[in-house]
Amino acid sequence: IAGHIVPLIPDGACIQLGIGGLPNIVGTMLAESDIKDLGCHSEMLADAFYHLHEAGKLTNRKKGVDKGKSTFTFAAGSQFLYDWMDHNPSCITYPAGYTNNPRLIAQNPRSVSINACLEVDLFGQVSSESSGIRQISGTGGQLDFATGAYLSEGGSSYICCNSSYTDREGNLKSRIVPTLVPGSIVTVPRSLTHCVVTEHGIADLAGRSTWQRAEALINIAHPDLRDELIKEAQKMNIWRKSNR
């Protein structure tokens, strides 16, 4: 998944990384790439930002807000991250009402938001908090940063998940679903979902019609589960071959 995202991030991008292993992997891969002059405006400061700093990639020179500073609200990582932050004038912490303000986020050109989710339906609605009524996580800043990055000049928002998982009975299940399970919380509405990424590719949903969204999302679903998704999309009258 990270391999699909990293080549699309431009020099001078301002990065936000969400909680979880995947966003950290993206950050670590960026540290090993040829990219330069990255910035940090993120609710969470993760280990990946330290690796970017050590690699000379995190300069914050191209930011539109807090130029020269890594902006964040809280840190969660390893001891080396905390040692780097300690009395470091290049790290600046603000309340979430500041860091998560979409208007401020959008003032950073080439703002890139990278977050994980639980499920995405064929309309492009993203659920990152619950499976049905079973609460798994909180809203956090995902919608704030998805909105800010979407509005940023040259910016992009990536919502990531594995295409499938295995349930307790050993059945292969898709994380790209026809409709969200009743009771599931919509974290990012379809009108603000930009790019959805699985290990099979990227579905760019910006400005797409309903059937284009469905087709793009089916194309990044697990290959063994795509036919069933097509059948369900046809039943819902949101996809048909004649749409082409």
Image (cartoon, grey):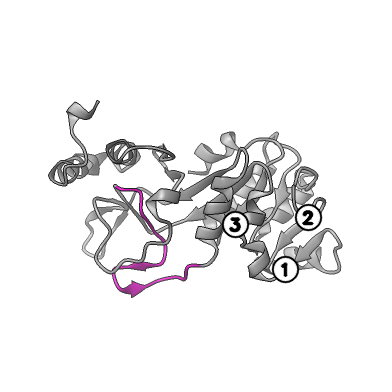
At label 1, the amino acid type is Tyr
Mark identifier at residue 94: 1
Looking at marks 2 and 1 on the same chain, the residue that comes earlier in the sequence is marked by 2
> In front here: 8 or 192?
192
Q: CA distance from mark 1 to mark 3?
A: 14 Å
Instruction: Residue under label 2, please give it.
Output: 66
Q: Are marks 2 and 3 in contact (CB under 8 Å)?
A: no
Residue under the point 72% across and 39% down = 12
Q: Nearer the viewer, mark 2 or mark 3?
A: 3
86 is higher (above) or lower (below) than 163: below
Helix, strand or loop for disc 1: loop
Mark identifier at residue 191: none
Q: Is residue 137 magenta?
A: yes
At label 3, the amino acid type is Pro
Predominant secondary structure, magenta span: loop
Q: Is residue 113 visible?
A: yes
Instruction: Residue under label 3, please give it.
Output: 102
At label 2, the amino acid type is Asp
Q: Is residue 20 visible?
A: no
Q: Is residue 172 magenta?
A: no
Looking at marks 1 and 3 on the same chain, the residue that comes earlier in the sequence is marked by 1
> Which residue range is magenta in the image?
123-139
